[in-house]
Image (cartoon, helix red, strand yellow):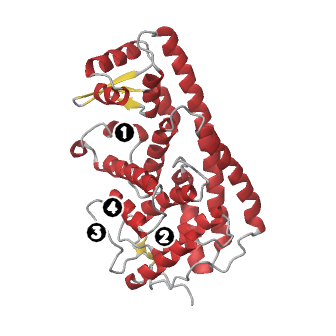
Amino acid sequence: MVFNPTRPYALPLLPPQLNFRHDKFIYLMLKTRTELGELNGYSHALPNPMLLLSPSVIKESVASSNIENINTTVERVLQMKLFPESEQRQPDREVLRYSEAVYWGFDQLKKLPISTRVVLGIHKKLLPDAKHAYRTTQNAISNATSAEILYTPPPAQEISALMGNWENFLHAEDGVDPLVKCAIAHYQFEAIHPFIDGNGRTGRILIVLNLIEQRLLSLPILYVSGFINKNRGEYYQLLREVSSKDNWEDFIVFMLQGFYTQAKETKHLLFMLADMLEETKERVRSNHKKIYSADLVEALFAYPIVSPVSLGKRIDVNYRTASRYLAELTKAKVLEESYVGKYHLFLNRPLLELIGK
């Protein structure tokens, strides 16, 4: 059947007719597995996994939301995280919901495989006011400027069967390399387009959860959306070419390149973060002996923007003690002081600059 973007797509079931060990894939798979293995290993060398996990998830959340034209910055989101939801800007609130969805999905993997229950739960965290079920009406993807229809997903009545097939493919012991399987599953989820809204964000969260379920990662620290965001035009073109030309090879190569690039970048980020952490610990230990503790410095890295209240909760001290610690470190220029409305905040500026790149 000739692909027609204006008609519901007759999406083929998985697995596709494809050489899963194509020469184009092998070298990239080996490189990517090496980088992911090193990233995994080095992440466990950190004294506290939250030191990398918290900044990485926020960084991923901002980039993934930016793909949907929800625009904000890592610094602004970390500020808003300290405020009540009623005081958060809409873009920041949506990014924080993305972050919450990542953590929720990661937690579910400890007791459940990736399944409809997990997919619907992620969608609920992203869009709490939406209907939390697969769509029951037809939708389409169109160009925001010209309104040209670019893709029409399968009819609503086919979603249940297609998602069942998608889930079976994810968990089948069929010899398909997990990295290739992850790329294929990502295309298929986006092609099914099971929700009225939130498909892209849900699908990108499922990428990293899939890599965790396949034991290629142990924490959701891969910044996949950064690569997609930088190469957004190519990403959408290759998604479309799988539908219109059955061009699986180029799409899979693109995704493997993304996994490799971001694993390498995240590993580099981890090294710089670890060095910065040790330098800051030594600085505080040497110059501020009375207030020094590893917990204090690590809290300022796991949570690069804090208030006296939030820091007190993190390291189990009262408000006055936390305020005193923060004032001393600000005077020494370890931290930077900021006022946002009625809130008195303290920023780990070097770390914010590192993770905001």
Q: Could you tell me the amino acid type at mark 4? A: Lys
Q: Are marks 2 and 3 in contact (CB under 8 Å)?
A: no
Q: Secondary structure at mark 2?
A: helix
Residue under numbered circle 2: 190
Looking at the image, which is closer to me, 5 or 180?
A: 180
Q: Name above or below for residue 87 compared with residue 115.
A: above
- Characterize the local packing of mark 2: few (<14), some (14-19) or many (20 or more) Cα atoms within 10 angstroms: some
**Is label 4 in contact with label 1 (beta carbons under 8 Å)?**
no
Question: Residue 131 has which mark?
Answer: 3
The CA span between labels 2 and 4 is 17 Å
Amino acid on which the number 2 mark rests in the picture: Glu
Q: Nearer the viewer, mark 2 or mark 1?
A: 2
Under mark 1, the amino acid is Arg
Q: Nearer the viewer, residue 210 or 188?
A: 210
Counting residues from the N terminus, which is met first, the one under dot 2 or under dot 1? 1
Question: Where's residue 267, x and y in %?
Answer: 62, 41
Disc 3 residue crowd, few under 14, some 14–19, many 20+, Cα 10 Å: some
C-alpha distance separating marks 3 and 4 = 8 Å
Residue type marked 3: Lys
Give the quarter of the figure containing the N terminus: bottom right
